[in-house]
Amino acid sequence: MAPGVNILAAFPPYLPGEDNSYGHPFRFLSGTSMACPHATATAAFVKSHRPHWSPAAVKSALMTTARVAKEQNPLAEYAYGSGEIDPVKALDPGLVYDMSFLDYVRFLCSEGYSNTSLSIMTDGGDVSCPSPSKYSDTRDFVNYPSMNLQVALDSTSPYAAVFERTVTNVGPAKSTYVATTTAPAGMEIRVVPARLEFEKVGEKKTFKVEQLGQEMDQVLSGSLVWAGSSGHRVRSPVVVSLAFVPL
């Protein structure tokens, strides 16, 4: 989430068909058209300081270091995302959820794209989908810094799902992270392993997040935080909702 209300922005002093009485080169504007430039500029700011980071790593840093919105809303993360971005904290996230070319291919395979479609999307690249038996038991196939489970609209049974994630150490070489979870009534979050120990920068560790709960009729928002020995807090939203969420 980025600032998008009453943002002072450059504006054409005269526009055909518009009220031209304003006559100034700046005015206050609101909406996603104002928030988007802030998020884009923040990503560019992080990239300028961490030029070797991938787009996925930059996005992860922005999401996991965001300040949690304090406002209460039954749709929680659907309303506020990971929170309000913090450009300075994003420069030092401790851990990032990175993605490679093959990670995106695996995700597209899980979505049902054929080898022919993959070849077109990768500009003729020599890629193919692995057999389904090679997939893990993870709920999704993308190393995203959040976990979002959707259950059937008419579901009256308990739900359970596993998300597999891999984090890369971009903080102190020798560091330890311990998982802490927050879950509302009706949701249980388990993390295995709940402790990650790193010996060098760039080292990767994989873990699994299991979501469990009973039948539900609302959006439930929890979180996973990896608390680092050097003071880092790497937060990921953990959400479960019905397959159809009325707006």
Image (cartoon, rainbow, N blue to C red):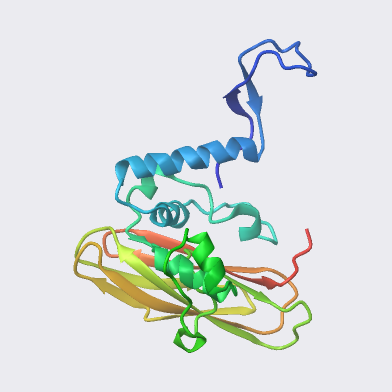
**Can residue 146 be seen by looking at this rendering?**
no
x then y, percent, for residue 212: 58, 83
Q: How many marks?
A: 0
x then y, percent, for residue 189: 52, 78
x then y, percent, for residue 153: 76, 77
| Residue at image location 53% in from the left, 56% down from the top | 82
| Residue at image location 47% in from the left, 52% down from the top | 66
83, above or below 108, in the image: above
Q: Quadrant of residue 111?
A: bottom right
Closer to the camera, 134 or 165?
134
92, above or below 99, in the image: above
On-image quarter of the C terminus: bottom right
160, above or below 3, in the image: below
Closer to the camera, 118 or 83?
118
| Residue at image location 55% in from the left, 75% down from the top | 110
Closer to the camera, 183 or 92?
92
Closer to the camera, 73 or 25?
25
In this picture, residue 26 sits left or right of residue 190: right
**Can residue 215 be seen by looking at this rendering?**
yes
x then y, percent, for residue 125: 43, 64
Q: Quadrant of residue 171?
A: bottom left
In this picture, residue 170 sits left or right of residue 56: left
